């Protein structure tokens, strides 16, 4: 069992046991949740594969991106921050990566040259956002558009909801102050992950909802736009897990990432004052 899942189980057991007030029940709860964390860990596994390389300049209809070089031209610079979902863990080809899907859609809608850069790191929590933003400032000017996907690891590592949301707020504030428009995909609802057994899944689901709500408030306060990924994706992922989850049972599949990108796109287009296609409007749900 990894440290992450053990920590989650111990914290959950302590929380539930404290409410029960009974020593026998506390021990039984602890053993049950520890066993369930072990089961979740063995079922989900760990995808250690590096996400496909996807950065470059995308134009409408291009078969492959142009490599970015100093002095090259781009009309819109799109940068992706966050965790393994933002990086595209579970994707088998660059075309499946959510950042690529967004970059291609932006190129098609706007007719402009879109530069895609990825700062997201697999396994990152909200604690890692500060370092990713630091790396962006070191590398060059801020992007025109910053997309952040983070939160699931904060839940499984049982980080404080308030602290995680505040770390996100600070990252959004820094990017917004630098002139970037910022779109945040809030924490997915982990109750859709069938590989996490009950009752652990119910507890994790509740924590993920709380974090998503706190993230939305923090993002708005910092000048960004928050997209309710949990509300938008949970029903589909529950109804078709064999299609929308990758082989590890935790990260999205190519079809799952397509949904993620599709739901983020309308918010990005609105922030850039670009037209939102009717097909995209049907899948949009932005926290006001």
Image: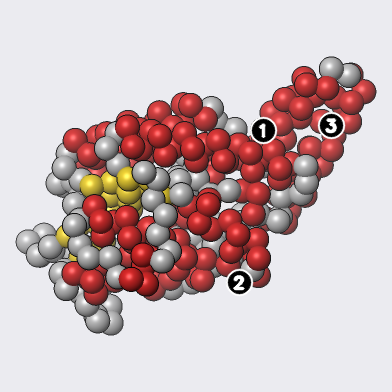
Would you call the spot at circle 2 few (<14 residues within 10 Å), some (14-19), or many (20 or more)?
some
Mark 2 or mark 1, earlier in chain? 1
Where in the figure is residue 153, as x and y percent of width and height? Answer: 54, 42
Residue at 30 percent of width and 70 percent of height: 277
Q: Which residue is outermost to the right?
A: 24
Mark sitting on residue 282: none
| Horizontal arrangement in the rendering, residue 29 relative to residue 44 (left or right) | right
Q: Quadrant of residue 65?
A: bottom left
- The mark lying in front, picked from 2 and 1, is 2
Q: Quadrant of residue 3?
A: top right
Element at label 1 = helix
- Label pair 3/1, CB-CB below 8 angstroms: no
Total of numbered circles in the picture?
3
Mark sitting on residue 29: 3
Would you call the spot at circle 3 few (<14 residues within 10 Å), some (14-19), or many (20 or more)?
many
Q: CA distance from mark 3 to mark 1?
A: 15 Å
Mark sitting on residue 243: 2
Q: CA distance from mark 2 to mark 1?
A: 30 Å
Where in the figure is residue 59, as x and y percent of width and height? Answer: 20, 74
Residue 134 appears in the figure: no
Element at label 3 = helix
Residue 7 appears in the figure: yes
């Amino acid at each position: 069992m990894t440290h992450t899942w053990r920590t989650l189980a111990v914290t959950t057991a302590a929380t539930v046991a404290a409410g029960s007030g009974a020593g026998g029940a506390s021990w039984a709860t602890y053993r049950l949740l520890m066993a369930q964390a072990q089961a979740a860990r063995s079922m989900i596994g760990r995808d250690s594969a590096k996400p496909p390389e996807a950065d470059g300049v995308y134009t409408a209809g291009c078969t492959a991106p142009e490599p970015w070089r100093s002095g090259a031209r781009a009309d819109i610079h799109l940068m992706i921050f966050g965790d393994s979902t933002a990086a595209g863990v579970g994707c088998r080809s660059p075309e499946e990566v959510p950042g690529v899907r967004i970059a291609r859609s932006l190129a098609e809608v706007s007719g402009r040259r879109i530069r895609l850069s990825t700062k997201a790191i697999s396994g990152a929590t909200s604690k890692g956002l500060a370092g990713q933003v630091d790396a962006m400032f070191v590398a060059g000017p801020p992007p025109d558009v910053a997309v952040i996907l983070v939160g699931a690891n904060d839940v499984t590592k049982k980080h404080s909801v308030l602290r995680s949301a505040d770390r996100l707020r600070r990252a959004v504030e820094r990017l917004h102050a630098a002139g970037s428009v910022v779109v945040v995909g809030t924490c997915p609802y982990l109750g859709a992950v069938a590989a996490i057994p009950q009752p652990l899944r119910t507890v994790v689901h509740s924590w993920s909802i709380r974090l998503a709500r706190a993230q939305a408030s923090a993002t708005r306060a910092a000048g960004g736009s928050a997209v309710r990924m949990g509300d938008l994706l949970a029903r589909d992922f529950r109804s078709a897990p064999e299609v929308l989850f990758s082989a590890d049972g935790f990260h999205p599949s190519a079809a799952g990432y397509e949904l993620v990108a599709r739901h983020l796109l309308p918010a990005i287009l609105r922030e850039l004052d670009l037209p939102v296609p009717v097909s995209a409007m049907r899948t949009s749900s932005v926290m006001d």
